[in-house]
Image: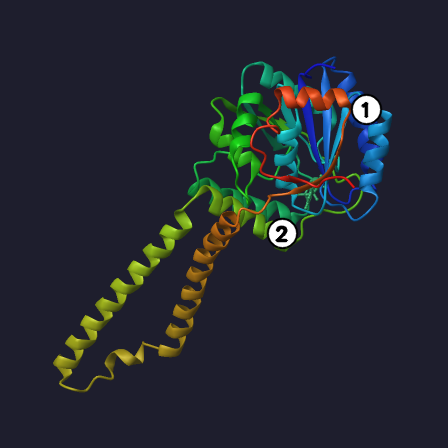
Amino acid sequence: MNRPEVSIVIPVFNEEAGLDQLFQRLYPALDALSITYEIVFVNDGSRDRSADILEAQFRRRPDVTRVVLFAANFGQHMAIMAAFEHCRGDLVITLDADLQNPPEEIGRVVEKLREGYDYVGTIRRNRQDSVFRRYASRAINSIREKTTRIRITDQGCMFRGYARNVVEMVNVCREVSTFVPALAYTFAKRPVEIEVGHEERAAGESKYSLYSLIRLNFDLMTGFSLVPLQLVSLIGMLVSMFSIAVYVFVIFQRLASRGLSDGIYVVWDRDILEFFLTGLMLFSLGIIGEYVGRIYQQVRHRPRYVVQTILETEEQKQDLSRHGAAAAGASHFVRPSS
Ligand code: UDP
Ligand code: MG
């Protein structure tokens, strides 16, 4: 097989309950498009039977299936980065494994890419997630929109298309904590967005806890904006200016009342003020810490992910070493098979 036109990239973490349904819809949907394609599954250290199910699927359709098996859980975005390094298609489409985005719509994304757009974002029509997720995402989207240069309407939707030039740029990035759609967006010359359908998760539960969602959004904020840091300095400046003003005021008041200085303390509750300022300082330290922590992770230069095995045919392997980016400057570690 030669280089396929389209690579479909799917990260998989504990999805045993829904994978068969995914295969049943994904392969026919792609066959119906009459394009050449490959599907790259990345098993992100699942603790259930996902890896076995993917392996069985590779045996069934080795012509169009490749499976990258991570040695542990490195996160959805690292899984996508790994697949980017191991795929060969001219056009690359990322999709979640849970069938929340209908695979039947892949054709529409391909069409846009063929029109010459190099980044196809998607907006979920009638989003089928909990009310809390919908409102939280709307708030986060608007904060991100104001603080970064990333113009993505619906950042949570991973069903997206990228042209080869964008994927190659992402492949030379070596960031540890990142958000692939935003990173890719920074390299896109002609981005576009389309609306896509959204369904309830076919099986299993969301793999993102509230904590991991918060962490992910910090990755997005710190990875693409310095505004939080600037905000900290700005607030610090305002507070200091305010304290100078108060100081001046107190001095004047003391001079005016010649020692009887109780005046201002009537409205000046030191306990509450200290409480507030301590909170502000911790918050600021926290923001700085989010950056420092990520800098620390980055400078240690540990492998971003560890690949245990790649299931692919000999032919696919040769194709990749000829065309793919994996050959050049890999930032990951492939564990030698025993
Ligand atoms: N996923 C992953 N690694 C993780 C968490 C999630 O590869 O650590 C995969 C998961 O299997 C799914 C996709 O990322 O294919 C999106 O996850 P999920 O559907 O749970 O997220 P949600 O739709 O709730 O945002
Ligand atoms: Mg989902």
Q: Residue 286, position in %: x, y?
A: 47, 60
Left or right: 162 as drawn, with respect to 309: left
Which image quadrant is residue 29 in?
A: top right
For ligand 1, tell me if the residue under mark 2 lies within 8 Å: yes
Q: Residue at x 33, y 60 (%)?
A: 236
Q: Quadrant location of the C terminus?
A: top right
Residue bearing mark 2: 212
- Pick whichever of labels 2 and 1 is earlier in the sequence: 1
Amino acid type of the residue that numbered disc 2 sits on in the rendered structure: Ser
Q: Residue 206 versus residue 269: which sits nearer the camera?
A: 206
| Residue 109 visible in the displayed image | no
Specify whether residue 211 is in view.
yes
Q: Given this view, does label 2 or label 1 mark the residue nearer the observer?
A: 1
Tell me which amino acid carries mark 1.
Pro
Q: 248 or 264, which lies in front?
A: 248
- Label 1 SS: loop
Residue 62 tag number: 1
Secondary structure, mark 2, is: helix
What colour scheme was applied to this rendering of the protein? rainbow
Q: Quadrant of ligand 1?
A: top right
Left or right placement of residue 163 versus residue 102 in this view: left
In this rendering, the answer to whether 30 lies above or below 207 is above
| 120, 72: nearer the viewer | 72
Mark 2 surroundings within 10 Å by alpha-carbon count, few (fewer than 14), some (14 through 19), many (20 or more): few
Query: Hey, which quadrant is residue 117 in on the image?
Result: top right
Which x, y percent locates residue 209? 67, 53
Left or right: where 199 falls relative to 241: right
85 above or below 226?
above
